[in-house]
């Protein structure tokens, strides 16, 4: 089961496009019949669905935005609420959380998505997965991983987030083969193991599925965090990208050249600010259309995430689109003295500094109503030496020096874990 690849993903690009055109026509008919939001959209924009013949006709339909989801939440629901069997929610990073309702069939689809995603990352029924993330607080990823691993036929250890001591004790006691967790937490786990004199090389772990943070640069090389992990621990890293709204994941195969698209579950477009497709190899906003979703399907939904699509075939045999590591979120772009930068670029600079133990990046509005950047840092060297090193790094890389504030670990943890947060925040957007 471990090397399972859906047949569609091995077909030619023309066959994949033909399949998706048929699924799109089914979706449009479903939305016209069942979705109050899309019924209004089609009517208001004079869209004749009979004229929609294929993928190229998608451009006639205005995209759906996160504001639409937030403002017209239940108008997206296509089934009676009595048919919703699972309620999940976004984290609300860029505004109030959005609730997504799943039918029993949608939960099965979610499990299938993660089954083929874990299989893409080399998972087999003989593996034991240690889940180092929350399964509560309406977190879709937690339940998706759990159900997907069960469908894979593998074993599961639900440890939850945090506490390196508990994670390492579980590794030594139950011998998991794959970890699922945040990359920067893996760094903390490595440091804890070294402090305890534990042997990383003799552990049972062979791989880690990394969630929530990049482990690669846009050209698919390991970034500073990825390099630090593999330099200390001989395990294979797999990156994954997903969102609650798309109910689908992009996961790397063993070649590490981008997250593979599952075309039976999702139509993907990469759009510019005018809602037009960008040229091949250019960054744009990931825009998705869900396939096979019953409860709250989405049509041309703009995720706010900026990435690059790669369309060449992969060495693994798949002919599907591959998505680059996220460059950032559209709303999180920071304009510093004429230089545009996303938080991920700031993270990479800080993660390359050996003395920086942890950090939070804060964007705020200055007195002249311009974007400003403040870095909250905990370091293991003197503040004077660390500040000089960090200032030089920013000056050489982006020619801009942010404000640097040194804080204790306790202060940093308060910044990272706001009230009710289920994820560690390393970027705080306090701009007006």
Image (tube, grey):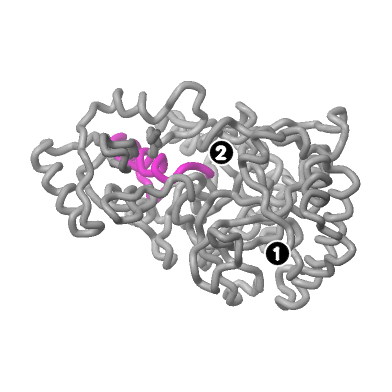
Tell me the number on the disc at residue 82.
none
Given residues 74 and 233, the one toward you in this image is 74
Given residues 189 and 183, the one toward you in this image is 183
Q: Horizontally, is 47 left or right of 279 in the view?
A: right
Residue at x 55%, y 53% (from the top left corner): 240
Instruction: Inspect the magenta stretch and tell me whether residue 413 lies in it.
Output: no
Question: In whole angstroms, how far apart are the C-alphas of marks 2 and 1?
Answer: 40 Å
Residue at x 58%, y 62% (from the top left corner): 271
**Location of the N terminus (image quadrant):** bottom right
Residue at x 71%, y 35% (from the top left corner): 72
Instruction: Inspect the magenta stretch and tell me whether residue 192 lies in it.
Output: yes
Q: Secondary structure at mark 1?
A: helix
Q: Secondary structure at mark 2?
A: strand
Indicate the position of residue 291 as horizontal and vertical percent values: 77, 54
Given residues 231 and 19, the one toward you in this image is 19
Indicate the position of residue 354 as horizontal and vertical percent values: 22, 48
Crowding at dot 1, Cα within 10 Å, few <14 / some 14-19 / many 20+, comes out as: few
**One can see residue 9 in this view:** yes
Q: Nearer the viewer, mark 2 or mark 1?
A: 1
Tell me the number on the disc at residue 131.
2
Indicate the position of residue 411 as horizontal and vertical percent values: 29, 24
Q: Are marks 2 and 1 in contact (CB under 8 Å)?
A: no
Q: Horizontally, is 54 left or right of 358 in the view?
A: right
Residue at x 48%, y 55% (from the top left corner): 326
Start and end of the magenta stretch? Answer: 180-202
Tell me the number on the disc at residue 59.
1
């Amino acid at each position: 089961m471990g090397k399972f690849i859906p047949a569609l993903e091995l077909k030619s690009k023309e066959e994949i496009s033909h399949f998706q055109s048929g699924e799109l026509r089914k979706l449009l008919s479903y939305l016209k019949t069942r979705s109050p939001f899309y019924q209004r959209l089609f009517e208001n924009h004079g869209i004749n669905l009979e004229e929609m013949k294929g993928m190229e006709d998608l451009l006639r339909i205005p995209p759906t935005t996160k504001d639409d989801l937030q403002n017209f939440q239940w108008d997206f629901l296509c089934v009676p609420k009595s048919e919703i069997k699972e309620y999940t929610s976004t984290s609300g990073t860029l505004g109030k959380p959005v609730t997504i309702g799943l039918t029993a069939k949608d939960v099965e689809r979610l499990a299938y998505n993660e089954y083929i995603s874990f299989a893409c990352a080399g998972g087999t029924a003989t593996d034991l997965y240690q889940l180092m993330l929350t399964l509560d607080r309406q977190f879709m990823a937690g339940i998706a991983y759990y159900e997907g691993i069960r469908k894979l036929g593998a074993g599961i250890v639900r440890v939850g987030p945090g506490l390196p001591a508990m994670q390492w004790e579980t590794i030594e006691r139950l011998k998991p083969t794959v970890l699922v967790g945040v990359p920067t937490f893996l760094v903390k786990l490595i440091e804890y193991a070294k402090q305890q004199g534990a042997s990383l090389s003799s552990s049972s772990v062979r791989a880690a599925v990394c969630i929530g943070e990049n482990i690669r640069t846009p050209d698919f090389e390991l970034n500073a965090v990825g390099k630090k992990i593999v330099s200390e621990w001989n395990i294979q890293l797999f990156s994954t990208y997903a969102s609650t709204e798309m109910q689908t994941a992009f996961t790397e195969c063993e070649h590490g050249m981008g997250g593979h698209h599952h075309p039976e579950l999702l139509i993907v477009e990469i759009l510019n600010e005018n809602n037009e497709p960008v040229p091949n190899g250019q960054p744009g906003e990931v825009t998705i259309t869900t396939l096979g979703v019953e409860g709250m399907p989405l049509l041309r939904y703009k995720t706010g995430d900026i990435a690059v699509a790669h369309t060449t075939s992969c060495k693994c045999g798949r002919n599907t689109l591959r998505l680059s590591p996220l460059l950032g979120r559209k709303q999180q772009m920071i304009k510093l003295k004429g230089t545009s930068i996303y938080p991920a670029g700031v993270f990479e600079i800080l993660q390359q500094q050996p003395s920086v133990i942890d950090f939070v990046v804060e964007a705020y509005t200055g007195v002249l109503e311009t974007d400003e950047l403040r870095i909250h840092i905990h370091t293991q060297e003197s503040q004077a030496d660390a500040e000089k090193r960090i200032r030089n790094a920013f000056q050489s890389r982006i020619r801009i020096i942010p404000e640097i504030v040194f804080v204790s670990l306790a202060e940093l943890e308060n910044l990272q874990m706001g009230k009710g947060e289920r994820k560690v925040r390393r970027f705080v957007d306090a701009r007006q």
